[in-house]
Image (cartoon, helix red, strand yellow):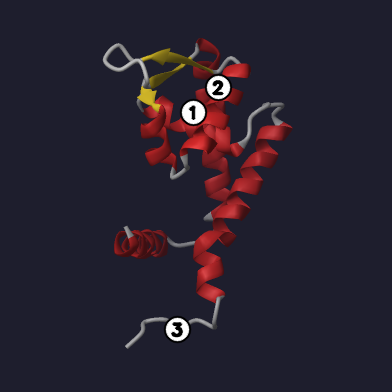
Amino acid sequence: MPNNHFKKGELYSFITGKASTAIARRLQKKFNAAGLNLTIEQWSVLYHLWKEDGKSQQELCNATFRDKPSITRLVDNLEKLQLVKRVASEKDRRINIIYLTKQALKLEEQTMQLAEETLNDALAGVPADQVNLCKEVLQKVYDNLK
């Protein structure tokens, strides 16, 4: 028996982006207000490089759930902003390894603080046990479809 207790389309639209879009819009507004010339999509690439610098473009595709053309475009734009640099892999020259620049490293603390503020805004009034339950449910949904 289906476990879908939602009106047709209600759960789908929520899970596929309603909350995520609202959070992304708020964070983008905070970036703009802080004078940061950075999109949320670009920030998501930087975020994964801050966690581990020197990833291949394919690893960034996997980490950000984006396709190769999207990552190529994002890395191109981040290079133009002098936030990353491409270096051909020593093992396979067809593979580019993406590294952060000093300028990108300077943005980490400020952007992470803005992201934390945004999440705090988004989760205001939501008890911790409900946040944990939500994380568990969404992880289960993801695992079911992986």
Marks 1 and 2, Cα distance to the nearest angstrom? 9 Å
> Residue 111, position in %: x, y?
56, 30
Q: Amino acid at mark 2?
A: Leu
The C terminus: image quadrant: bottom left
| Crowd rating for badge 1 (residues with CA inside 10 Å; few <14, some 14–19, many 20+) | many
Measured along the vertical axis of the image, is residue 29 above or below residue 122?
Answer: above
Observer able to see residue 53: no
Residue at position x 41%, y 65% from top?
A: 130
Residue highlighted by disc 3: 5
Residue at position x 65%, y 47% from top?
A: 25
Residue at position x 53%, y 48% from top?
A: 120
Label drawn at residue 46: 1
Query: Which of label 1 and label 2 is nearer to you?
Result: 1
The N terminus: image quadrant: bottom left
Residue highlighted by disc 2: 107
- Looking at the image, do the residues carrying marks 3 and 2 touch, with CB atoms under 8 Å apart? no
